[in-house]
Image (tube, grey):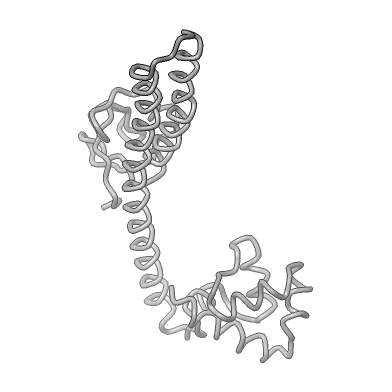
Amino acid sequence: MDQIKIGKFIAEQRKKQALTQAQLAERLNITDRAVSKWETGRAMPDSSIMLLLCEELKITVNDLLHGEVIKMENYNKEMEKQLIEMIKEKEQKDKQLLTLEWVIGVLSVLILLIPIIIAAYLPIEQEWVRMVIVFSGFIPCFAGFFFALKIEQVAGYYKCKHCGHTHVPDFKTVSFSMHMGRTRYIKCPECGKKSWQKKVISKE
């Protein structure tokens, strides 16, 4: 989505309705600073107020997302184009998230190892101090692994080996399933069979 184009479109439609930024903001129960950010392309309207914004500007959500009024004869084609763009954006974000997962995983291991190495090689007389240093790495390490696992659950899809169905399992399933890297032994909600399912970015 072209935020600059959408922002200019919002400003044009607001002016057509003879509204100032402050008046539109008041009707939407937000600040005029938020409206200013939309119109300059620095931010997008939140999904929770998108319908109300379109109602105030006398446009459709599809018009808003395209940054122009879509004619009826081009409506289906533009909807399809918008859907494809949204899918591509999600795939790109999922790739970034899965890269972040690896970064968090490596950092979590380092955070765990550093206190262990310090405790092992530094001359510390009190044994309890050594234990405190060792355990100080466990809490941030487990927190890191939790976030990495959450990323793996929500980013992309798992693909059933039997029927090819792609799905997003719940966090409990991902947490307690056997796995080899990002391939997990889980049940397919479509065919009901268990298999080693690979992580994929696209639903295709």
Left or right of 161: which side holds 27? right
Vertical placement of 155 versus 77: above or below?
A: above
Which residue is at the front of the view, 200 or 194? 200
Question: Residue 176 in the image: x percent, y percent?
Answer: 38, 22
Which residue is at the front of the view, 92 or 124? 124
Left or right of 42: which side holds 189? left
| Quadrant where the image shows the N terminus | bottom left
Q: Quadrant of residue 86?
A: bottom left
Residue sitting at 50 percent across and 84 percent down? 68
Q: Quadrant of residue 163?
A: top left
Vertical placement of 181 versus 51: above or below?
A: above
Residue sitting at 43 percent across and 19 percent down? 134
Vertical placement of 157 versus 59: above or below?
A: above
Vertical placement of 186 versus 27: above or below?
A: above
Which residue is at the front of the view, 47 or 115? 115
Badge count: 0
Question: Residue 89 in the image: x percent, y percent?
Answer: 37, 62
Question: Residue 78 in the image: x percent, y percent?
Answer: 40, 77
Residue sitting at 25 percent across and 36 percent down? 160
Which residue is at the front of the view, 149 or 73? 149
Question: Residue 119 in the image: x percent, y percent?
Answer: 39, 18
